[in-house]
Image (spheres, grey):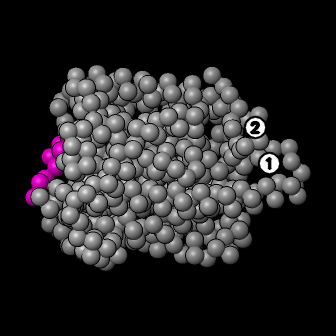
Amino acid sequence: MRRPLDAGNDLRSDYRTPSHSWAAGTGPGLASTAADNDPSGIATYCLAAAQWGYGMLAASVLSYPFVVALQLVSAHIAAVTGHGLTENLRAHDARPVLYFVVARFLLANLLNIAANIMAMGTGMYLICSGHPMLWAVLATLVSAMLQWFVRYERYARVIQWLSVGLFVYAGAVWVVHTPWDLALLRSFVPRLEWSKDFLEMLLAVLGTTISPYLLFSQAEQEVEALHARIAGRPPGESAAIRQGHLRKMRHDIVIRTACSNAAAWFVLAATAATLHTGGHTINTLADAQGALYPIAGRFAPSVLGLLLIGTALLAMPPLAGSAANASVSAFGLQHGAARDRRIAYVLFALMAVGLVAAVTLLALQVEPLHILYLSAVFNGATVAPVIVLIAQLSIKPPMIRDLRAHWSLRAGTWVASGAISVVLCAWFASEVFS
C-alpha cells in the first residue's frame, strides 16, 4: 500500500514508498523517548544498576553531549549531501569497509529485532499469562501490519502510551530512599573498574545509549524530509527551507536526546535504589519488575509488560527499516519505486528471520534477558566503527564547509569515537588476558 510521505505541516511529497517504517523520528516526546529506550536498553540498564548500583549513572549523563553531536552530524551529512549514511560511506570509503560495516550493522539489528520479539512475548505473558512463544508470533504480526498499513507517526501517538512505565521508574526514585548525594556524585564522577564483567557491562550500556540504528535512521529521515520540502522549489527558496529545517532538526534532537537519556537515568537510579540496595539480583526479564514495586505494587508485572511491548513496537520500525535501507543502499540503488520495493522486501525478510530466531530461542527456553543483554553488547561493539566512519565523513567536502561553524560537533564526534573505541579495546583485552 503506497501513500505520500508526510513532510511537514503543509507540505506533502510525491515521493511514494511502500513502507514507511524506517521513518523513526516523531520529534520530542514520549514516543521518541521510548523508541530510544527499547527492551534491550531497559534490560541492560536494570542489569547494570542491579549489579553495579549507582556506578553506571554517569553513562547516561556524560554520554548526552556526544549522542547529540553524533545525531546532529549524521543529520547534517544527510541534509548537505541529500543521501543517507550508507550512500555517503559508499562514496567515500573502500567497498570492503562499507560491506563490513553494513554487515555488522545488519547482524546487530537482526539480533536486536529477535530480542525485542522475545521481549514482547514475555511482556504479554506478564500481563495475561499464556505461552510467550505464541504471544511473540502475534506481536510480530501486529508490528508488521502496523509498519505496512499505518504511518509510523500515526500509530506512535497511540502506542506511546504503553510506555508510561518509563515515568513509573521516575516515580520510584522519589518514593524509595535514594541517597541523592551519592546518585548525583556518580552521575558526573563514574566509578571505573578494570574487570571483564564491568567493561562488558559498560560497553553494553554505551551500545544501547548510542545505538547505531538511531544514527542511520536519523540520517534517512532528514533525507526524506528535505526531499519532500525542496521538491520543485527554486534554488534560493530551497536554501532557505534547508536552513530552517536544520534549525528545527537541531532543536528536536537536543530535546529528544535529553528525554531519552533522562529516562535511562531514572531506570538506572530506580533499580539501584531498590534491587541493588536490597541485595537482589536479576536472573530473568520478569525480575526487573522489582524496581517498580514501590510505586506500582501488585500491578508491577503488568506495568513492565506494557513497557516492554510499547517500547518494542516503537523501536521495531527504525530497527528493521534502517537495516533494510542500509542493505539496499550499500549497492548504490538510486531513489525510486524499485528501491522502495527492495527496502520493503528486505525489511519483512528481516522481520521474518528475527521471528524465526526468537521463536527458536523461546522454544529452547533461552531466557530473553540474556538475548537482550547480548544485543546491547553487540551494539556496543558495532557502534565503534560506525562512529569512526561518521567522524571521518564530517571532515570531507562538502560537509566540512557546512560544519565549519560547528567545531564542537566535530570535536564531540571524534571524542565519542575515541571513548567507545577505548572501551571496546579494553573489553577485548580483558577477554583475551583474563
Residue drawn at (44%, 33%) of the image: 350
Mark 2 near mark 1, Cβ–Cβ under 8 Å?
Answer: no
Secondary structure under tag 2 reads strand
Query: Residue 246: within the magenta?
Result: no
Residue under label 2: 13
- Which is nearer the eye, 172 or 231? 172
Residue drawn at (48%, 48%) of the image: 30
Q: Please name the amino acid that badge 2 sits on.
A: Ser
Q: In the rendered view, tell whether residue 265 sits above or below residue 136.
A: below
Left or right of 297: which side holds 112? right
Outermost residue on the left side: it is 279
- Which is nearer the eye, 14 or 313? 313
- In space, the residues marked 2 and 1 are separated at their CA atoms by 9 Å
Q: Can residue 123 be seen in this view?
A: yes
In percent of width and height, residue 308 lies at 33, 39
Residue under label 1: 230
Q: Earlier in the sequence, mark 2 or mark 1?
A: 2
Residue 278 - label: none
Residue drawn at (57%, 34%) of the image: 154
- Which is nearer the eye, 290 or 216? 290
Q: Can residue 428 be seen in this view?
A: no
The secondary structure that most of the magenta stretch takes on is loop
In percent of width and height, residue 423 lies at 32, 68
Splitting the image into 4 quarters, where does residue 275 fall? bottom left
The residue stretch that appears in magenta: 279-288
